[in-house]
Amino acid sequence: MAAKDDPIVIKKYANRRLYNTGTSTYVTLEDLAEMVKKGEEFTVQDAKTGDDITHPVLTQIIFELENKDGQNMLPIPFLRQLIAFYGDQMQMIVPSFLEQSMIAFSKEQERFREQMKGAFGKSPMDMMKMPTPMKALEEQTRRNVEMFQNAMRMFTPFPSAGGNSAAPAEPAKKEEKSDDLQELKAQIAAMQRKLDTMS
């Protein structure tokens, strides 16, 4: 018998049916999406081999949700950039960056909700004076993208394809990378302090 804190095991059969071993019932991808929203931990296993197939099943859930009318959350430029990172030298950094960004966003989510609640019930003039939650979200996103771009510049070992730079420019590039590294370290330290104060 599984411990109470262990993730629920979902078995996927050859006929593509999903079986929740915790409730002894068949479930759908929509049911799994609801479990995620409720914070219920689960793993998906191939019923025949026992292989962990949680990642492809979660990816399939995102695909299904993205195909529903009005539910697109992943903008086309983001999808293009994500596809471009596959096979790239930056591929190993992207998952960690996205995970940390989502953790930070989740911690901010409650604050955004409170701002939204506070916005309703105020007069239109009061609402115009207060900073909107979307502005705060946009600012957080802008900072995340900026940090990621700085990280990309720092880890790229070669100059950009268009630049046949001469040898004398090399010391300036090293200095610029050093500045970028210091700036990135400072941004990471600031984000860590912010996360520590939120927890």
Image: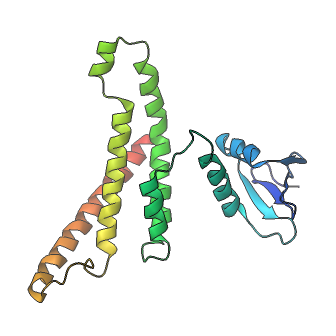
Please give left or right for residue 48 compared with residue 121 in the image.
right
- How far across and down, in percent of the image, does residue 118 sit? 42, 20
Q: Nearer the viewer, residue 91 or 78?
A: 78
Residue 49 occupies quadrant: bottom right
As displayed, is residue 132 above or below residue 120? below
Q: Residue at x 47, y 72 (%)?
A: 91
Q: How many marks?
A: 0
As displayed, is residue 91 above or below residue 75? below
Q: Residue at x 50, y 72 (%)?
A: 86
Residue sitting at the far front? 69
Residue 38 occupies quadrant: top right
Residue 85 occupies quadrant: bottom left
As displayed, is residue 176 above or below residue 144? below
Quadrant location, the N terminus: bottom right
Q: Residue at x 56, y 38 (%)?
A: 70
Q: Nearer the viewer, residue 47 or 82?
A: 82
- How far across and down, in percent of the image, does residue 137 sit? 38, 39
- How far across and down, in percent of the image, does residue 20 sit? 84, 50
Q: How is this picture coloured?
A: rainbow
Residue sitting at the far left? 168
- How far across and down, in percent of the image, does residue 71 sit? 57, 41
Q: Residue at x 19, y 68 (%)?
A: 179
Please give left or right for residue 72 compared with residue 140 in the image.
right
